[in-house]
Amino acid sequence: MIFLEALSVNQDSYLEIGGCDTVELAKKYGTPLYVMDEELIREKCRRYTDALKEYYPGEGIVAYAGKAFLTLAMARLIHEEGLYLDVVSGGEIHTALKAGFPPEKLYFHGNNKTGEELEAALGVGVGKIVVDSVNELEDLLARFKKRSAKGRVLLRIKPGIEAHTHDYILTGQEDSKFGFGLADGSALEAVELVLSHKECFELVGFHCHIGSQIFQLEPFQLAAEKMVGFMAEVRDRWGYTAVELDLGGGLGIRHRRGDTPPSIDSFVENSASAVQKAAEERDFPLPRLVLEPGRSIAGEAGITVYEVGVIKDVPGIRRYVSVDGGMMDNIRPALYGAEYEAVLANRADEEPREIVTIAGKACESGDILIRDVLLPPISRGDLLAVFSTGAYCYSMASNYNRNPRPAVVFVSEGKSRLVVRRETEEDLTALDEL
């Protein structure tokens, strides 16, 4: 049942992560509990930086996509590993700065950055702003003029590439809320606007992101080719040679045993080779290549541990096994139809013999964490560990039904440390006013 490198089973048949016994972690920190293998996160960061150095002869940057999972501890870890950071809100900027992350190493994304967020970003000296619309360009132009300053920007481009993934996490196609289109000419119009105001804008380059949880390499290759082609067209029209190409992220991870995403090395090599080939064909100088992985760094490093509660049989249909969390701490099954696998953390090597459905405790019929999973016979009080929850679970968690959000623990070399404390019921009413 164990198919992830972060996990093992100890002599007591308990699931271990990062050398820590999950049963002991549940006793110490309570459930539901997010557990992250710190060393695996660091290893994934290094795989990206090493692969970029190996496969790309030009300058390369790895920028972690903070939206996947971001806390003070994570921001500090990312900085310690030498990565840049992709942020998409004022809150993520605040988190990064509070953790001591250098503002000049931040890429500020988002399709609807507010005036307050832009002002804050400019005030702290965010390194680069990835511009998403004409409205944003006009807003920034006014702010740069007022400051008598020049800002470093990238333009987000929709390359028209559709990858095989869920519609809600598909972003590179023409019908998307993100970016400037190639097909409709808005990308060229944006370039013209920026280049006509060189006193305010330093157009560093271009960005694209085609989606998330992608298992094929071809879409990334096609996106790289299209983007380099666009950069060459801009050079030929205006004599401007962009120095940076940001290809975003999107590499998938293993949520289930049969999942076969490309390796980090394969993904980086594919992207780097595509950029080199396209640049050679167009006699375009190699740009600085930026990759923005998120899920593929944090996802497989995390598990969520729950305690089993009510078990209910619907004769002839299914057995529902309810846990003490649900869509409040993992919205992805309800939102995307995401699929997961799990084991009983306190009986991790016991043979699975029955198919059950794992239900959350939220008052929603759609609060199903895993439908039809094969597990050993389950009893109340058992601990269930769900795999690959390190990305987009904590970051999308809510207080639905007034449930406190879980704690987050980092584990490494047999030791654990609390990086986000469990919310209390007092926390739930802390902002309320009578």
Image (cartoon, helix red, strand yellow):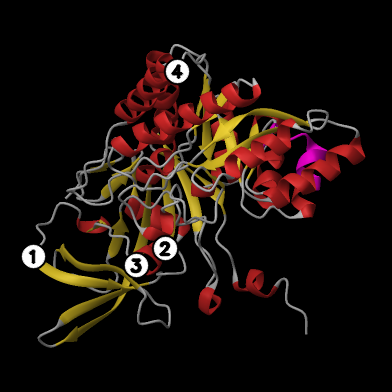
Residue picked out by circle 4: 282
Q: Nearer the viewer, mark 4 or mark 2?
A: 4
Residue picked out by circle 1: 353
**Amino acid at pointer 4:** Arg
Helix or strand or loop: what does disc 1 sit on? loop
Mark seen at residue 307: 3
192 or 25: which is nearer to us?
192
Marks 3 and 2 sit apart, C-alpha to C-alpha, by: 15 Å
Helix or strand or loop: what does disc 3 sit on? strand
**Amino acid at pointer 3:** Glu
Mark seen at residue 140: none
Mark seen at residue 330: 2
Marks 1 and 3 sit apart, C-alpha to C-alpha, by: 20 Å
Q: Are marks 4 and 2 in contact (CB under 8 Å)?
A: no
Helix or strand or loop: what does disc 2 sit on? loop
Q: Measured from the top left, where is residue 430 in percent x and y?
A: 71, 71
119 or 233: which is nearer to us?
233
Q: Is residue 218 left or right of residue 328?
A: left
Earlier sequence position, callout 3 versus callout 2: 3
Q: Is residue 415 visible in the rendered structure shown here?
A: yes
